Amino acid sequence: MYDLVFDDKVIDFMNKLPKSIKSRIFTKLLLSKENPYRFFEKLSSKGYYKLRIGNYRAIADIDSRNRKIQVTLVGHRRNVYKRD
């Protein structure tokens, strides 16, 4: 089982979402703890992975050695891939 670790900006973003969407995202992330490679897809140009949750995406770094999923970004699919 992998550990889920959230960046502060992910927590801030999820607190602003409606409860139904927040619950859906969190449930999907909890399901991925058993085998993250079943749910996450590797992004082609970067070393990160994405998880599709309806119109939202979670971007994470998966560390197999330490069995950790570091969720770095959650956002709507139209602007989640635009990094500042």
Image (tube, helix red, strand yellow):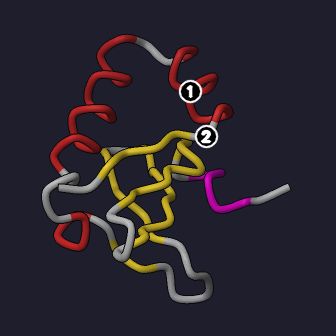
Residue 57 at x, y percent in the picture? 45, 51
- Between 39 and 65, the one nearer to me in the picture: 65
Q: Which disc is residue 7 wearing?
A: 2
Q: Of residues 27 and 80, which is closer to you in this image?
A: 27
- The local secondary structure at tag 1 comes to helix
Of 78 and 61, nearer the camera is 61
> What residue do we see at 42% from left, 70% from top?
63
Residue 68 place in picture, x, y as percent: 38, 59
Tell me where residue 4 appears, x and y as whole percent: 37, 45
Q: Residue at x 67, y 33 (%)?
A: 9
User: Of helix, strand and loop, which one carries label 2?
Assistant: loop
The span shown in magenta is: 78-82
Contact? badges 2 and 1 (CB < 8 Å): yes
Residue identified by numbered label 1: 11
Q: Main secondary structure of the magenta part?
A: loop
- Amino acid type at image mark 2: Asp
Q: Residue furthest bottom?
A: 44
